[in-house]
Amino acid sequence: MTVRVALFATCLGDTLFPETCKAVLRLLERLGCEVDFPLSQTCCGQMHFNTGYRDETVPLARRLGESFAGYDAVVAPSGSCAAMVRDIYPKLLDSDLPGRMYELSEFLVDVLGVTDVGAYFPHRVTYHPTCHSLRMLGVGERPLKLLRAVRGLDLVELPAAESCCGFGGTFALKNSETSTAMLGDKMRYVLDTGAEVLTAGDNSCLMHIGGGLSRLRAGVRTVHLADILASTEEEPWLATR
Amino acid sequence: MARNPVTWLGVPAFPEAAHEALADSQLRRNLRHATHTIRDKRTRVVSEVPDWEELRRAGEVIKDDVLANLDTYLERLEAAVTARGGVVHWARDAAEANEIVLRLVREAGTDEVVKVKSMATAEIGLNEALEAGGVTAVETDLAELIVQLGHDRPSHILVPAIHRNRAEIRDIFRREMPGAPADLPAEPRALAEAARKHLRQKFLTAKVAVSGANFAVADTGSIMVVESEGNGRMCLTLPETLITVMGLEKLVPSWRDLEVFLQLLPRSSTAERMNPYTSVWTGVTPGDGPREFHLVLLDNGRTQTLADPVGRQALRCIRCSACLNVCPVYERTGGQAYGSVYPGPIGAILTPQLVADPHDKQAASLPYASSLCGACFEVCPVRIDIPEVLTHLRAKTVAAKPKTSPEKLAMTALGKVFHDPRKYEAAQKAGSLARYLVPGGKITKLPWPGSLWTDSRDAPLPARESFRTWWRNNRG
Ligand code: SF4
């Protein structure tokens, strides 16, 4: 029996990081899933909710629930958007979406039961756990297990990995200076590892840290976990952006 | 109504107040060192307790029961304290509490009181109120004394002088402490010795002591203070009159409940297995300790906080300060940027609720002083879901904003775009046109408010083709 999976691209992924969405698609199809992308989906409303715009969040939450009705599982390449649906939606409205929402590494390890996805990625990589994956979802070792099984990949530990990168959605604007100070420490630790690539399960945090590293011209790339896992010897990951 | 002194007059909203602290690299280094040391130690001693999670849940349940039946427990406490010869006073706000204490001090015929470190009296600005009434209050906790002598403000719940280093403390002592040796070295031992000499004389002459309370047992009327230096115990035993100012929520139903908190508190706060000094008293005992005991029960915004089903969990707080020590925002800005006696994550949710004024810009900025990383919730010994309360209070702030505020207009407009997939795709396409305007594949400079991002970070450009457009063209 094939699992009917819907891809939740997230507004950020859809608009800014379509390559990551394509990577999730390739990866899930390679693992035998039937993947659909309902076009009525847009945004989970996390930014509105976290900034205090609760009334504006509810219709977005309702719309997302309707978009994904009828799928066995919904997979998001974003810990924070998955956490928004799973942890916050039950407080906002009655919906069965939270029970079917998975962050990518959870879906691979828990539902498909794989840790070796047949990936090839010959680079020195360090992993940032991201706050919402770590604390709200509790994804734990899953991403690391997946990374350890990637051929050619040299995984190095990130010091103070569990500390926040300072993104926090509108926090990065509202408390820009504090956010920058947090980012500064995160970048220092990333550079200390000597890794060529920083990965995470969330493009929002990667966009933040990557934006800082790019400004420093630090020569470290940020690559989403999905892009790494989709990369194979036949179809290796290419820096497209 | 008098201003609630829980926030400090003249402190700007959090982002501006943080600016100065962020520029002070010495302060940031001190804070990082202090918070990381205690944080690591806390993790170690907490991991020794196999049933830590159950203890946290027990703490949560006991406190929630207290909050749900506060009237019953408070009446029980009042009856028990009175039966043992104590006097109970009820104070609606800071002004009332200060008036009661000042009157009691005057009745005792003195103009100097010694104080046990207490958040409740800091919250109501008692020292300032006493001073205005001609009474000198002497702080006997070392860190609190440093803040007091330095005419400074506290920056941490447990270690109010965490922002000061030894040399600064030496200078403060030399300048402000009568009888401090002119050649006082900046050595912890010597500094402690100077403070001890200074305080000993105060303990022996003081007629009145003022304390807070960590816990009060409703069944027996017993009050408990836990501390590490023993100076509090001197205050609690030597003077003739003891006045305790206690927030309404500091109750536990019975002695048995203390077992839970006496495990949770020391490991969470000072990362010790057991706290060094635990003092308990019940009313008065002839021939032993103070002859008069007064308990001032302080509301000051608490019953109002209790009325909010989400916000009320902040009243479970046992002031351990674990959330401060793990907070990445606190670590960079220190406590004074919060402009309140309650800094850090707990301050961000408690202070605005005690202030209870949605139009107070400074208080309203506090729930935004968090990246919602959730580290505070993870360590909180009574499981206060601080991120939940933060977003709840943000919603209150937003509700109080005029409809025409630029942020509200932008968020409403964006909400509409997100709600309509066609508008959404059109906006994506419009955004991707930006690629033709911006060379180099990334955005390095944006006008305000985008500059708040691009001042320190490059921003990615919208993709040439969004995923949905690609899907429609290739898979749809
Ligand atoms: S909120 Fe929790 S962690 Fe913070 S001081 Fe209170 S009890 Fe401690």
Image: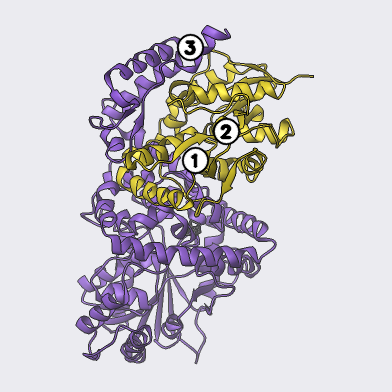
Q: Can residue A31 be seen in this view?
A: yes
Residue B164, percent from left and from top: 31, 70
Q: Can residue A168 be seen in this view?
A: no
Per the image, the residue denoted by label 2 is A228
Residue B379, percent from left and from top: 54, 56
Per the image, the residue denoted by label 1 is A197
| Label 2 vs 1, first from the N-terminus | 1
| Amino acid at dot 1 | Val
Q: Tell which of B329 and A239 is nearer to you.
A: A239
Where residue B9 sits, quadrant-wise, is bottom left
Display colour for chain B = purple
Disc 2 and disc 1 in contact, CB within 8 angstroms: yes
- Image position of A142 (left or right of B4): right
Q: Quadrant of the N terminus of chain A?
A: top right
**Circle 3 crowding by C-alpha within 10 Å: few under 14, some 14–19, many from 20:** some
| Amino acid at dot 3 | Thr
- Same subunit: marks 1 and 3: no
Q: Residue at x 28, y 71 (%)?
A: B127
The letter of the yellow chain is A
Dot label at residue B469: 3
Name the front one of labels 1 and 3: 1
| Amino acid at dot 2 | Ile
Q: Tell which of B379 and A17 is nearer to you.
A: A17
Q: In which quarter of the image is the C terminus of chain A?
A: top left
- Image position of A169 (left or right of A141): left
Q: What is the CA distance from the residue labelled 2 to the residue labelled 1?
A: 10 Å
Q: What is the CA distance from the residue labelled 3 to the residue labelled 2?
A: 23 Å
- Seen in the picture, residue B428 relative to A144 is either above or below; the reply is above
- Same subunit: marks 3 and 2: no
Q: Residue at x 32, y 57 (%)?
A: B340
